[in-house]
């Protein structure tokens, strides 16, 4: 029998290492409260080097099985949140209906000039000021999405005085008698960077998903534009036309 070449041996060892970590994750032997041991402990456990270990962990991160937070280490990702753009429901309700726990943290609420792309989407002149509300959201305690909301100031003159950690959909309905009408979506894979990356405690370059949503009310008036920055492993976009639109 011919012995493996050094390169073949390295490849076989790496595949064995990666599969061992996958198995330990699947069987619940690796993470305690979703946190993985330190890289040093993992390298000792699997009898490998930190360099080889990090490459294996990076593969598992790309597959959405684990994720990393700056200065906190590695965590098992858990199930993705299902996001169907056809559902007319808010984040809190969507999460609750999947037996998950959601929370929202307000980062900023100010009057600000919107980027030219946002002005164009909302059919306003370049340089128009909107209410800019920035929030980050957790599912089961994990940071999963950073959102920038740009709201028409004429439609929502006093919204900054409201509880902005609650559902904007419910706030629109209860305070302003506004229901969503037509909605448009654009979904693109991105590399998280800058403020979205920092607010999600991820490194610049981490894989993400950007969802841009433009909302109109029941009379066709443009209301707002939401720009969502998701960690790629936290969400699954699923569209099924058999689903009923939810109010």
Image: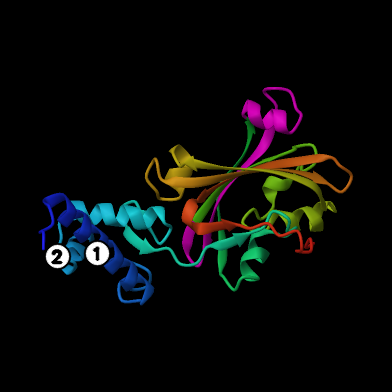
Q: Which residue is mark 2?
A: 47
What residue is at 50 percent from the left and 56 percent from the top?
144
Res. 73 image quadrant? bottom left
Q: Inspect the magenta stretch and tell me whether residue 141 lies in it.
A: yes
Neighbour tally class for label 1: few under 14, some 14-19, many 20 plus, Cα within 10 Å: few
Res. 203 image quadrant? top left
What residue is at 24 percent from the left and 64 percent from the top?
16
Q: Would residue 195 be found to the left or right of residue 32 on screen? A: right
Residue 161 appears in the rendering: yes
> In the rendering, at what x and y percent does residue 183 appear?
76, 46
Q: Inspect the magenta stretch and tell me whether residue 45 lies in it.
A: no
- Screen quadrant of the N terminus: bottom left
Asked if labels 1 and 2 touch by Cβ distance under 8 angstroms, the answer is no
Neighbour tally class for label 2: few under 14, some 14-19, many 20 plus, Cα within 10 Å: few
Query: Which tag is nearer the camera, tag 2 or tag 1?
Result: 1
Residue 31 appears in the rendering: no
Q: Would residue 142 be found to the left or right of residue 34 on screen? A: right
What residue is at 63 percent from the left and 70 percent from the top?
96
> In the rendering, at what x and y percent does residue 62 appear?
40, 52
Mark identifier at residue 16: 1
Give the magenta range: 115-143
């Amino acid at each position: 029998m011919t012995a493996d070449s050094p390169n073949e041996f390295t490849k076989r060892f790496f595949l064995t290492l990666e599969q061992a970590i996958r198995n330990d994750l699947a069987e619940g032997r690796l993470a305690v409260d979703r946190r993985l041991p330190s890289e040093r402990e993992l390298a000792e456990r699997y009898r490998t080097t930190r360099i080889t270990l990090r490459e294996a962990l990076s593969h598992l991160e790309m597959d959405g099985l684990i994720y990393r937070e700056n200065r906190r280490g590695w965590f098992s990702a858990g199930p993705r949140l299902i996001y169907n753009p056809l559902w007319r429901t808010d984040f809190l309700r969507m999460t609750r209906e999947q037996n998950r726990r959601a929370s929202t943290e307000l980062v900023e609420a100010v009057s600000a000039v919107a980027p030219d792309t946002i002005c164009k989407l909302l059919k306003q002149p370049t340089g128009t000021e909107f209410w800019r509300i920035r929030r980050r959201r957790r599912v089961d305690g994990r940071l999963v999405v950073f959102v920038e909301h740009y709201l028409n100031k004429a439609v929502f003159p006093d919204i900054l005085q409201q509880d902005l950690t609650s559902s904007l959909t419910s706030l629109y309905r209860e305070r302003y008698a506004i229901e969503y009408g037509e909605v448009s979506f654009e979904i693109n894979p991105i590399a998280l960077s800058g403020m979205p990356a920092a607010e999600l405690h991820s490194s610049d370059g981490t894989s993400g998903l950007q969802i841009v949503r433009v909302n109109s009310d029941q009379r066709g008036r443009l209301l707002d534009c939401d720009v969502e920055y998701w960690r790629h492993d936290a969400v699954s976009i699923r569209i099924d036309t058999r689903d009923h639109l939810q109010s």
